[in-house]
Image (cartoon, rainbow, N blue to C red):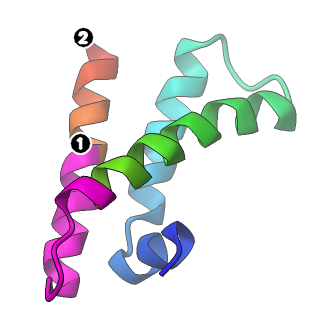
Amino acid sequence: MTLEQIIDMTGEFTHLHELVMIHIERSGGFTGSDAYFKTVQPLLDLLEVEIRIRFRPGMTQQQVKLIVQNWIEQEMRECRN
C-alpha cells in the first residue's frame, strides 16, 4: 500500500494539509509550487517512517488512522512551540 493510499484510507488528508500549511506559514508563506513541494516531501518522508515503525500486520484501519493522526498532531504541537 502506498502512502497516498494510506492517507486516503484513513481520511487524514485535510489534517495533513493543515500541518503542511503551518510549515509553509512558518517558512514565510506560500511562494510557489516548488516551495510547497520542498515543504511537503520531507513531511511525507517522516510520516512514512513513522508508519513503517509502528505498523503491525493485522492492524485495523482505525489503528492505522491513529498512527497517522497522532503523528500529525505531534508535529503540529512541535511547530507551535
Between 29 and 64, the residue placed more toward the observer is: 64
Residue at 84 percent across and 38 percent down: it is 33
Query: Could you tell me the amino acid type at mark 1?
Result: Glu
Crowding near the residue tagged with mark 1, few <14, some 14–19, many ≥20 C-alpha atoms within 10 Å: some
Q: Position of residue 1 (x, y in %)?
A: 47, 81
Label count reads 2
Query: Could you tell me the amino acid type at mark 2?
Result: Asn
Q: Quadrant of residue 9?
A: bottom left
Q: Earlier in the sequence, mark 2 or mark 1?
A: 1
Q: Are circles 2 and 1 on residues that touch, CB within 8 Å?
A: no
Residue at 34 percent across and 20 percent down: it is 79
Q: Which mark is residue 81?
A: 2
The stretch in magenta equals: 52-71
Residue at 57 percent across and 20 percent down: it is 25
Residue at 25 percent across and 46 percent down: it is 71
Q: Is residue 48 above or below residue 4?
A: above
Q: Is residue 23 above or below residue 16?
A: above
Residue at which label 1 appears: 73
Between 81 and 52, the residue placed more toward the observer is: 52
Q: Position of residue 60 (x, y in %)?
A: 15, 87
Q: Quadrant of residue 31?
A: top right
Q: Position of residue 55 (x, y in %)?
A: 21, 67
> For the stretch drawn in magenta, what is the main secondary structure?
helix
Say whether residue 10 is magenta. Answer: no
> Which corner quadrant holds the C terminus?
top left
Inter-mark Cα distance, 2 to 1:
13 Å
Determine the secondary structure under disc 2.
loop
Q: Position of residue 52 (x, y in %)?
A: 31, 59
